[in-house]
Image: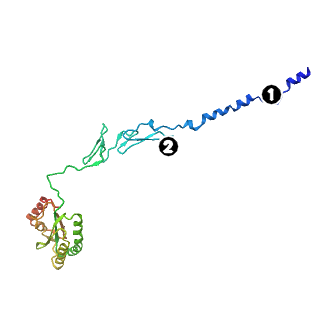
Amino acid sequence: SYVCEVSEINTSSTSTTTPTKISTSTSTTTTTSTTTPANTQPTTSPGNVTCFNGGIPVNGTNGGNTTCLCQPGWTGDYCTTRVCYNNGTLNPAGYCQCPPGTGGESCEYLKCLQQNEEVDFDNLNRQMMFVLDITNRNAPALNDLSRYIGELIRDIGSSHRDWISKYFVVGINSTGSHTLGTAFGGDVGGMESIFTSAAQMAANFNDNSTYIPLYEGLMRHMYELNSSSFINVFTVAAPDESNFTNVIEGYDFVLAGRHL
């Protein structure tokens, strides 16, 4: 019997290390499959968002929502709001109300306004008159002008050869007005000669008057200047307004001819 007791209380290492206990401790490996990043950050298909009017779905970065990349002329989350350009306004119906001079669904086009046919604004074949104060006090200014008049005429011709068809040059001193010369458009040498002569006249005269009959000079070619011509006045003397008739006629001449 003694031998039997010993065999019952003897615990060997092989009997206590059962494989079942070891296998239960390794069951924690099942938790690794539930924490993988692939399952928590799925790829969203662009087809889940519908973009209108040619918009393109674009995936957001860092897991952001899919947004719409809109075509020009459209805006909003789904490209459903029209953009109005050139100060156009969007009405409640979703269409652009365009200001005058613009057109298109988004006011993106510029168009010509209806031309006023009552007045002819022809820019070609106009004429130009120079009214020069040829008193001695204006001699330095005329001397400078005579050096640059050629460049001025060339610049005018380079804009358009038919812009100015004829030039008139009028000189005024205390005794009255005088036509110093005329030249056709593009005649650079002719205009330089006229202005050089005007500068010499002012330098040689002892006329230091502070008033000149300016309105008389304006009307000297009133029947020759065509409509919408240009008038340039170079003077240091004030206009003599003692002759009220000349003043009124001078104003009427400029206004009626729409001269600039």
Q: Which of 169 and 46 is in front in this view?
A: 46
245 relative to 45, above or below = below
Q: In this view, does 227 lie to the left or right of 150?
A: left
Location of residue 194 by image quarter: bottom left
What secondary structure is found at the residue carrying circle 1? helix
Badge 1, how many Cα within 10 Å: few under 14, some, many 20+?
Answer: few
Q: Residue at x 49, y 43 (%)?
A: 61
242 relative to 119, above or below = below
Q: Position of residue 213 (x, y in %)?
A: 12, 69
Q: In this view, does 111 lie to the left or right of 250?
A: right
Q: Name the residue under label 1.
A: 15
| Mark 1–mark 2 distance (CA, rounded to whole Å) | 59 Å
Q: Name the residue under label 2.
A: 61
Q: In this view, does 9 lie to the left or right of 150?
A: right
Name the amino acid type tagged 1: Ser
Name the amino acid type tagged 2: Thr
Badge 2, how many Cα within 10 Å: few under 14, some, many 20+?
Answer: few
Q: Which of 185 and 4 is in front in this view?
A: 4
Tell which residue pokes out farthest to the top in this image: 1
Q: Position of residue 10 (x, y in %)?
A: 86, 26
Tell which residue pokes out farthest to the bottom in this image: 204
Q: Which colour scheme is used?
A: rainbow
What secondary structure is found at the residue carrying circle 2? helix
Q: Which of marks 1 and 2 is nearer the N terminus?
A: 1
Location of residue 120 by image quarter: bottom left
